[in-house]
Amino acid sequence: NGATIILSKSGSVRGNHFHKKTIQHVYVLSGKMKCLSQKPQQKVIMAIVEQGDLVSHDLLESHSFEALEDTLFLVLSSGLRTGKDYEKDTYRLEVALSDLV
């Protein structure tokens, strides 16, 4: 339903939320990020993603990204997370995923 290009400066953290009605795909155009994700009732998993990598987050899957260098990425969303509804399906975490690792 939507596509967003995001530039994250080195050291910045994005996410620490989940979506109830949106599936999200992140494609890294350049740079490198640490990706943390957690499906309900499971352990947090971590991956380093860089140019050419694609990461998908399913419904209810918590996720966050820390830019390890300036990183440009494309977010493809299927669901409410577009246009005027961008924040309607965003549920912030009380505890950052990095604090659970």
Image (cartoon, grey):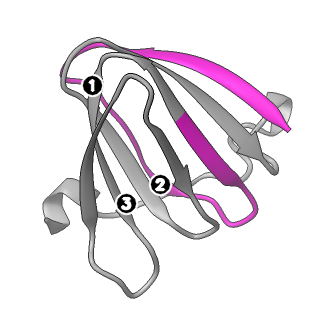
Instruction: Answer left or right for 3 relative to 96.
Output: right
Tag of residue 32: 1
Q: Residue 5's x, y, as percent?
A: 60, 17
User: Residue type at mark 1?
Assistant: Lys
Q: Magenta part mainly helix, strand or loop?
A: strand
Q: Please tell me how crowded label 2 is: few (under 14), some (14-19), or many (20+) other residues with Cα within 10 Å.
A: many
Residue 51 quadrant: top left
64 over 76 or under it: above or below: below
In the image, is residue 5 part of the stretch drawn in magenta? Answer: yes
* Callout 3–callout 2 Cβ contact below 8 Å: no
Sequence order check, earlier mark of 2 and 1: 2
Q: Residue 62's x, y, as percent?
A: 45, 62
Out of 75 and 50, give the one closest to the viewer. Answer: 50
Q: Quadrant of the C terminus?
A: bottom left
Mark 3, residue position: 37
Residue at 72% in and 42% down: 77
Mark 2, residue position: 17
Residue at 42% in and 54% down: 63
Q: Residue 80's x, y, as percent?
A: 81, 48
In the image, is residue 6 part of the stretch drawn in magenta? Answer: yes
Residue 72 quadrant: top left
User: Residue type at mark 3?
Assistant: Ser
Q: The magenta stretch spans which residues?
A: 1-26
Sequence order check, earlier mark of 3 and 1: 1
